[in-house]
């Protein structure tokens, strides 16, 4: 039977896996939107907010700092996912 510490460890592992998945997908979507936003058929250098003034574009990276933040979000998501799965394996092994 699982004791309280094992249950807490498994819940922490599950939360870390879920946070990793959310982080990975959020970063990947931001990177994809950034790439799609920069694929302008006209070749103009207008900002995305200038081209689509009524759309919320604050989540789309348009600078190197934004792309770096989105890439770090993806990397952190992969790390958290792997770490959570490792915690789950270790917690299930103790039970």
Image: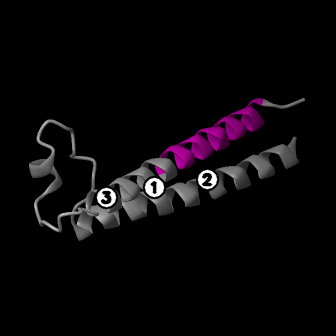
Which label lies toward us, 2 or 1? 1
Q: Residue at x 42, y 57 (%)?
A: 73
Mark 2 or mark 1, which has the lower sequence index?
Answer: 1
Q: Residue furthest right?
A: 1
Residue for badge 2: 81
Label at residue 34:
3
Q: In the rendering, at what x and y percent does residue 19 appear?
A: 53, 43
The N terminus is located in which quarter?
top right
Quadrant in the picture for residue 55: top left
Cα separation between marks 2 and 3: 24 Å
Q: Depth check: 61 or 38 in front?
A: 38
Question: Taking 71 as reference, is 93 above or below it?
Answer: above
Disc 3 secondary structure class? helix
Residue 56, quarter of the rendered image? top left
As measured in the structure, the alpha-carbon distance from the residue carrying label 1 to the one carrying label 3 is 10 Å
Relative placement, left or right, of 64 versus 84 is: left
| Quadrant position of the C terminus in the picture | top right
Q: Residue at x 42, y 54 (%)?
A: 27
Q: How many marks?
A: 3
Q: Is residue 13 magenta?
A: yes
Q: Is residue 21 magenta?
A: yes
* Left or right, residue 46 beside residue 76: left
Residue that appears at 31% across and 65% down: 67
Q: Earlier in the sequence, mark 2 or mark 3?
A: 3
Q: Locate residue 59, reporting x and y percent.
A: 27, 47
Tag shown at residue 28: 1
Range of magenta residues: 4-23
Mark 2 and mark 3 residues within 8 Å of each other at the beta carbon: no
The kind of secondary structure element at disc 1 is helix
Disc 2 to disc 1, C-alpha distance = 15 Å
List x then y, in percent, for residue 31.
38, 59
């Amino acid at each position: 039977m699982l004791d309280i510490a094992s249950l807490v460890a498994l819940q922490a592992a599950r939360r870390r896996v879920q946070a990793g998945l959310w982080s990975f997908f959020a970063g990947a979507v931001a990177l994809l939107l950034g790439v799609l936003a920069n694929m302008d058929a006209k070749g103009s250098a207008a900002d995305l907010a200038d081209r689509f003034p009524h759309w919320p574009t604050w989540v789309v990276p348009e600078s190197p700092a934004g792309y770096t933040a989105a890439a770090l979000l993806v990397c952190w998501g992969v790390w958290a996912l792997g770490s959570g799965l490792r915690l789950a394996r270790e917690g299930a092994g103790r039970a």
